[in-house]
Image (cartoon, grey):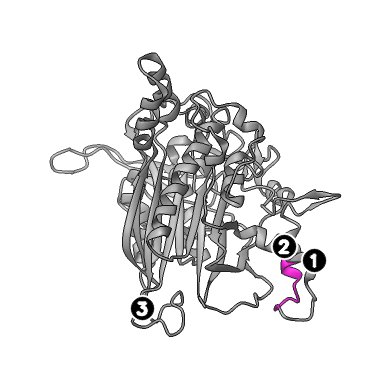
């Protein structure tokens, strides 16, 4: 049976169990008429179904006693841009250097067919649609892939989108490409009111000028300008949508969603902290203009207890934090300026706080067992050590396993009501093969998605 006459063919689910045969004949370029014998290539192996990851469900949390109305789900996910799927590209990403033609592969433990973009994009789309989130905050979205894949596919699924690419292009070996942050939101749930695009390079200019002149300024420019960006959307919850609080007709219930990808180089923690501080100061200006719930998402490339994470989660950085010792430009002094007033909390820390007072009285569908299982995947502390409440990992490769991705919310306006299950590291690595690392045939990014359902608190 003839399936296609196109130059490329992607096997479909109906092809599983069958062997494919390709026929090719030389043709005259102007007329397309065959001018030679037909060559045949028959694949020895039959098509097999793509492996599927175990489903991850939303775990309901212990109900909050405060009055709330309206709810929505928000997901953040670094999907691993195709331009970074090589060892040299990944190193360039970490160091902020230009890309050169790839040699070798950081993800050599992943079969080449599972690392190809043609395979990964379908796997990623299936995963994203399966979460059914109201807001998707995605990082490492390549600009051409946004236009020709993510945008049309997610539009068909009922999403609107806003995209902000990084301010510097990268050479992939054959062409120049950008990646950036994309925020998708359900068009039956939200309408876009305003967007703010944060380019950290622009903010770096005045800082570099203050550092001094000549070589000092040039050194400051090189250290601070890393092309990272953030995308901030102000959304209106549509009447009749699940995010709109009851009785909100005629009002304008708003939500501010920030999506960012902070610089990766582990030797530039001062730059990471400066970028996070710059983003938070921008959000403070929005908060000062209106009482508006906020969600801050992204790949912050900062582990729990880092200075950047401390600033986000506690509103300040301890002056004695060891990362403040590395500040060659003096941009972090005095430490007292490293603060904000947004009252942010991490969504997964909400589950970490719930374990000690759960009654198991059937208030939850599973009697709280889901929360207890989730807490087993969180740093809840113990033996006199206070835990961070964060997942043990959101990024898992052969060389690094740790948490880099977060969802923060303004705790005076929102409350988490459910959280996406987290995979255990041992079970995740069991899906990855003997070498152990993401991406894999099952999971097509080196990060995992995290997601929360949040309810809007009624203001008194």
Which residue sits furthest right? 383
Return the mark for residue 356. 1
SS at circle 1: helix
Tell me the magenta residue range: 364-371
> Where residue 125 sits in the image (x, y, percent)?
46, 57
Going 61% across and 42% down the picture, which residue do you hit?
A: 317
Mark in front: 3 vs 1:
3
Residue corresponding to mark 3: 251
Q: Using a 10 Å C-alpha cutoff, classify the residue at mark 1 as few (fewer than 14 neighbours), some (14 to 19) or many (20 or more).
A: few
> Where residue 289 sits in the image (x, y, percent)?
37, 60
Quadrant containing the N terminus in the rendered view: bottom left
Q: Which numbered disc, 3 or 2, marks the residue that appears first in the sequence?
A: 3
Mark in front: 3 vs 2:
3
SS at circle 2: loop
SS at circle 3: loop
Going 49% across and 31% down the picture, which residue do you hit?
A: 331
Q: How far apart are the two marked residues, 2 and 1, measured between alpha carbons?
A: 7 Å
Q: Which numbered disc, 3 or 1, marks the residue that appears first in the sequence?
A: 3
Depicted 224 relative to depicted 403: above or below: above
Going 57% across and 52% down the picture, which residue do you hit?
A: 406
Residues 409 and 343: in front is: 343
Q: How far apart are the two marked residues, 3 and 2, measured between alpha carbons?
A: 34 Å
Residue 252, by quadrant, is: bottom left
Say whether marks 3 and 2 touch (CB < 8 Å): no
Depicted 396 relative to depicted 17: above or below: above
Q: Is residue 365 magenta?
A: yes
Residue corresponding to mark 2: 353
């Amino acid at each position: 049976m003839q399936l296609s006459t196109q130059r490329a063919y992607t096997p479909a689910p109906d092809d599983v169990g069958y062997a494919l045969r390709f026929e090719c004949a030389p043709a005259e370029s102007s007329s397309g008429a065959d001018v030679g014998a037909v060559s045949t290539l028959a694949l020895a192996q039959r098509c097999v179904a793509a492996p599927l990851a175990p489903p991850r469900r939303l775990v309901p949390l212990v109900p909050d006693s405060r009055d709330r109305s309206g709810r929505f789900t928000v997901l953040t996910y670094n999907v691993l841009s195709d331009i970074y799927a090589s060892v040299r590209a990944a190193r360039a990403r970490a160091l902020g250097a230009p890309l050169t033609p790839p040699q070798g592969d950081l993800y050599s433990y992943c079969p080449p067919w599972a690392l190809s973009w043609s395979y990964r994009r379908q796997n990623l789309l299936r995963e994203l649609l399966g979460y059914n989130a109201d807001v998707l905050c995605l990082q490492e979205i390549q600009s051409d892939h946004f236009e020709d894949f993510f945008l049309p596919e997610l539009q068909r699924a009922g999403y609107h989108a806003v995209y902000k690419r990084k301010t510097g292009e990268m050479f992939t070996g054959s062409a120049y490409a950008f990646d950036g942050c994309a925020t998708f939101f359900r068009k039956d749930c939200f309408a876009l009111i305003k967007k703010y695009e944060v380019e950290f390079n622009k903010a770096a200019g005045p800082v570099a000028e203050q550092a001094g002149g000549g070589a000092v300024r040039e050194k400051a420019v090189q250290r601070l300008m890393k092309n990272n960006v953030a995308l901030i959307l102000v959304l209106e919850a549509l009447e009749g949508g699940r995010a709109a609080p009851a009785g909100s007709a005629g009002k304008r219930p708003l939500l501010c969603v920030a999506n960012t990808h902070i610089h990766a180089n582990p030797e530039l923690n001062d730059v990471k902290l400066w970028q996070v501080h710059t983003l938070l100061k921008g959000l403070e200006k929005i908060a000062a203009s209106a009482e508006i719930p906020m969600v801050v998402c992204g790949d912050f490339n900062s582990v729990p207890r880092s200075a950047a994470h401390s600033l986000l989660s506690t509103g300040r950085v301890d002056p004695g934090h060891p990362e403040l010792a590395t500040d060659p430009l003096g941009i972090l002094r005095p430490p007292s300026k490293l603060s904000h007033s947004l009252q942010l909390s991490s969504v997964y820390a909400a589950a970490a706080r719930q374990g000690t007072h759960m009654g198991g009285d059937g208030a939850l569908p599973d009697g709280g067992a889901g929360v207890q299982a989730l807490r087993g995947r969180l740093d809840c502390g113990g033996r006199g050590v206070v835990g961070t409440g964060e997942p043990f990992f959101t990024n898992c490769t052969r060389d690094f396993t740790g948490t880099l991705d977060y969802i923060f919310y303004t705790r005076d306006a929102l409350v988490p009501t459910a959280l996406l299950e987290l995979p255990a590291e041992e079970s995740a690595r069991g899906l990855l093969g003997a070498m152990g690392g993401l991406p894999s045939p099952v999971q097509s990014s080196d990060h995992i998605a995290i997601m929360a359902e949040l309810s809007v608190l009624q203001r008194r």
